[in-house]
Each structure stands twice: as structure tokens, then as C-alpha cells.
Image (cartoon, grey):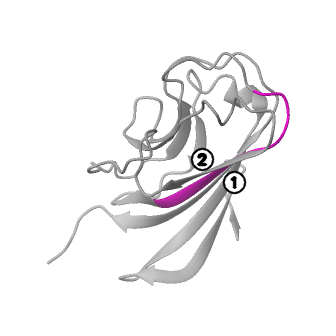
Amino acid sequence: MVWTTNDAYVRQFPETLQGIPVRMVEKQITAAQVLTLNATPVTVLASPGAGRFILPEFTIIYKSAGTAYAGIAVGEDLALRYTNGSGTILQVSETTGFLDQATAQTRVLNGLQSAAATALAELNPTANAAVVAHMLAGEIITGNSPIRIRMFYRVVPSTLTV
């Protein structure tokens, strides 16, 4: 296990795909941070360095029991993006029926996935970019449950050699 500067930890697994290991990062987002995710995205995973990009395998998002988040409007979905709030979208979780519940909730996003639970057709990866959690449209009004994000990913070279 390797601790990073953004209060997350990264674990590397032995499984490989053509020599590229699967890694895992876990990040807790406080309730106060959830309420400001549109204006202030939270870094889930630091940039991998020059000439490499992050490719998600799957992500588990967990909201503990507590006061349901309120004021969730259409389009206020939780996204994982490259760089910042305007970066390329990697995965999206619908927040209605998830964050607006008082009970504990878990969602799993497979690979590159939209809020409609459909695979994104393609990805134009951003080299040397962090992955951030971001609320796509507006801010949620109230709620007090932290969110824990566990993302399994690979760090892939941004160029291929022949």
C-alpha cells in the first residue's frame, strides 16, 4: 500500500494485462465536499506522470447511511473526470435513487460508463492527468453522509510502439 499526498492510498495488484498491473485507489469525500463538488472537484487519483494516462477498470462508490442528500436536480450526477470540472468524463453515476437515500447505498461503474449505465463508445485519454470527482450540474443542497470511492485502474503508456 502506498499513501499519496491527497489522503488516498494506492494498492497494486499482481494481475496484469500485457504487463500493465491493475491498481486500486480509495478516497473518502466528506459531506461538506459533496455539497460543493460542482464548483470544487476533489482529486481521487494524482496524475500518473508524463507519457502515461489512467484507464479505469471499474469503480465502487459507497454512501453510508445518514441524512439523504436533498435538492438533487436533473443532471446533477457524480462524475469521474480527468484533470478538473471541465476535463474528459470517464465514468458517471446517477445520483437520484443513490445519494438521495437515507440508507447505505453502493454503486458499481464498469469500465468507461455513462449515467445511463451504458458504455462510452470511446475515450480520448488525457496524458499526465489526475482523476477528480465532480458534480456535473449545480450543487446538492443538503446531506451529511460521506462518500467513499474505490477505483480499480491501470496506468497506460500514452503512445504505442511498433
Please tell me the numbered disc located at residue 156. none
What residue type is disc 1 on?
Answer: Ala
Q: Secondary structure at mark 2?
A: strand
85 shown above or below 27: above
Please tell me the numbered disc located at residue 8. 1
In this view, the residue in front, 49 or 11, is 11
The residue that disc 2 covers is: 44
What residue type is disc 2 on?
Answer: Val
Quarter of the image that includes the C terminus: bottom left
User: Is 62 a magenta residue?
Assistant: yes
In this view, the residue in front, 77 or 35, is 77
Residue under the point 71% across and 19% down: 70
Residue under the point 69% across and 23% down: 35
Spot occupied by residue 40 in the image (x, y as percentages of width and height): 59, 26
User: In the displayed structure, does residue 115 sit left or right of residue 98?
Assistant: left
Q: Earlier in the sequence, mark 1 or mark 2?
A: 1
Q: CA distance from mark 1 to mark 2?
A: 7 Å
Residue under the point 47% across and 34% down: 84
Spot occupied by residue 107 in the image (x, y as percentages of width and height): 62, 49
Mark 1 vs 2: CB contact within 8 A: yes
Magenta stretch bounds: 57-68
40 shown above or below 92: above
Q: For label 1, count other residues whose C-alpha is less than 10 Å away and answer few (under 14), some (14-19) or many (20+).
A: some
User: In the displayed structure, does residue 85 sit left or right of residue 123?
Assistant: right
